[in-house]
Amino acid sequence: MKNRTVVVGLGATGRAIASSLLRRADVEIVGAADRDPRVVGQDLGVLLGGLANGVVVVSDPAELPAADLAIVATVSDLHRAADVLLPLLERSYNVLSICEELAHPWRSHPDLARRLDDTAKAHGVTVLGSGANPGVLMDTLPLLLTALTQRVESVRIRRRTNMSRYGAILSKFGLGLTVREFATARSRGEVVGGTTASSRPSGRSRQGSDGISTRWTWERSNPPS
């Protein structure tokens, strides 16, 4: 029996997810939605570079057919994502989202986290935030690798990613801006994140061609003697 699935958001990540799901024997994509007028009305299979599969992209998730699972690949801001997540939960979709702030929402958005949890429980479904990071690369994977040693003094992770295909993310993180331009944009809420001595750009970076490097470090405050 195949799991009926819909995909909301057909940017670079959403398309990659949909392409992967189309190759799975246990999943049937029955619907797709995106607000970009350039893709609305297109056949999903053709949009992804393959054969037509009869799934026509719609502009409003409310137009999607009933399914077991909705995969939401849209924004990182949980308040904005909730406008999509809550109606899907109310329609009894199980929801899996790449929204980073949904990975651990109880600390950053306790009221909204409770609302999402209550809505999911009321309709007998689930809602989960997951992805490469957070989700695997910089949390689950290092924890798993520590099982191979008896004593951990520190954990240092550096991730370098080519983001040239991800136009929305380039804008969100302010790639291509000088330090001063970034600070101004951040004060206006136009970009997220910050700069460090190791990641601060000198002059202008080449937007669309440079990767994004992130680092996470954990060290024992009182290492045993």
Image (tube, helix red, strand yellow):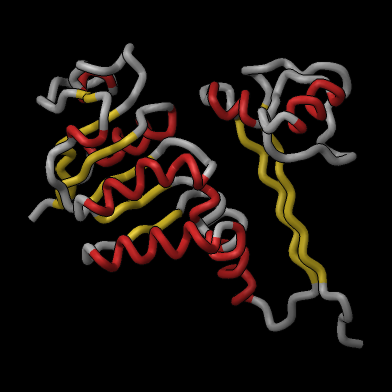
Whole-percent x, y for residue 160 in the image: 67, 39
Residue found at x 42% / y 46%: 82
Compared with residue 123, is residue 137 higher up or lower down, i.e. above or below? Answer: above
Farthest residue, direction top:
38
Residue 25 in sight here: no
Residue found at x 35% / y 58%: 127
Q: Is 82 or 173 nearer to us in this picture?
A: 82
Residue found at x 77% / y 59%: 217
Compared with residue 66, is residue 105 higher up or lower down, i.e. above or below? Answer: below
Does residue 102 appear left or right of residue 53 in this picture?
Answer: right
Residue 150 in sight here: yes
Please count the marks in the image.
0
Whole-percent x, y for residue 28 in the image: 15, 43
Quadrant where the C terminus is found in the figure = bottom right
Does residue 60 appear left or right of residue 11 in this picture?
Answer: left
Quadrant where the N terminus is found in the figure = bottom left
Whole-percent x, y for residue 215 in the image: 74, 49
